Image (cartoon, rainbow, N blue to C red):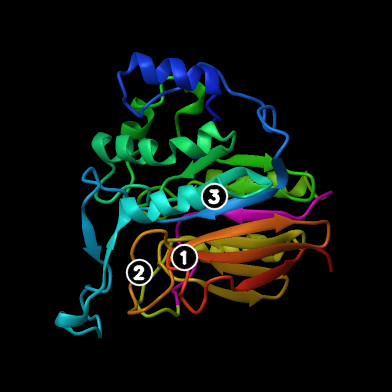
Amino acid sequence: MPVTLPPILRRKFIKGSLAFAGSAITAPSSFAKAGSQSARLDQSRVALLADTHISADPNLSYPGTKWPGSPVKESEHERVNMAKSLATTTKNLIALNPLPAHLIINGDCAMSRGTVAEYKELLRLIEPIRVAGITVHVTIGNHDNRENLWELLPFLKKEQMGIHAEVIELPHANLILLDSGRKGILGGKQLNWLAQELDRRTNKPALIFGHFNPCPNRGVRPIKGMSDGSTLLKLLAKRKHARAYFYGHTHEWQQDRRGHLHLINQPAVSYYFGKGHAHGWVDMNLTHKSADLKLHCINLKHPQHGERRKIGLTD
């Protein structure tokens, strides 16, 4: 399920920090309304992250370019420290003015199989984001374990635990977060729900999010994608106000288009599969006409840092 982590009220954060004797893991007792903590929150600005792959060991570095069939020579693999990448992202995010009101981590939050220790480290690293007043939304990827994540979020109610999707209503668009699980399957029930939500929300364009690529990718590392991706694409093709599908999983920054539907492959915050490829996050600003995307690379000197793309929200 897409899990929502509400902002941490500063007063509760201070009390929680004292109570946990310096522990970075705190949980608010109730959900705060979006934008209630700071006038600097922009409801039309959303930070888009994917594939953070946080390890329980903050010092772990991983060679993402090393995979079966990789063209990169053994001596030339590039290692990335995932915790450092997310910490850098957090620092840059909370320096924005105005701040995005929402942040989406589009799956694969954890490094291995979604252990409790990995999620503790994730929550520690994104805590400044929540303290800044930003609401964090998390989808499940193939490296995640929803039960272990729930264990660390005692404020979740029973009805919020399970396989279901989420709609984030923003001034210029509706964001729909899907649950493709650990195996890349949406299932008939969720696809029917998506169709119903789209059909009753035709007053605004819709941007859809899910961790898995909907079809085989064209990147450096071949990845098959979700098993019912073709059904998803057919469903979205029939509804012109469905303007884009955002996904992670393949660790590349790419954009394709099928008629009115844009396919946005989000870069990984963590490691990348191709030598010298960009990794980072995307700053999305919404207007009534477009969704404007800007790539923020972890390496500010990367040639693609600051690259912009646009999704039209009107015909």
Residue shown at the point (72%, 43%) measured from the top left:
43
Q: Position of residue 121 (x, y in %)?
A: 31, 39
Q: Nearer the viewer, mark 3 or mark 2?
A: 3
Q: CA distance from mark 1 to mark 2?
A: 8 Å
Q: Secondary structure at mark 2?
A: loop
Q: Quadrant of residue 219?
A: bottom left
Question: From which residue to which does the magenta span run?
Answer: 203-217
Badge 1 or badge 2: first in the primary sequence:
1
Q: Are marks 3 and 2 in contact (CB under 8 Å)?
A: no
Q: Residue at x 82, y 62 (%)?
A: 289
Q: Is residue 5 visible?
A: no
Q: Which residue is mark 3?
A: 93
Q: Secondary structure at mark 3?
A: helix
Which three-letter amino acid code belongs to the residue tagged 3? Leu
34 relative position to 2: left or right: right
Q: Main secondary structure of the magenta part?
A: loop
Question: Dot 3: few (<14), some (14–19), or many (≥20) neighbours within 10 Å?
Answer: many
Q: CA distance from mark 3 to mark 2?
A: 21 Å
**Disc 1 + disc 3, Cβ < 8 Å:** no
Residue 184 visible in the current orientation: yes
x%, y% of residue 168?
A: 66, 41
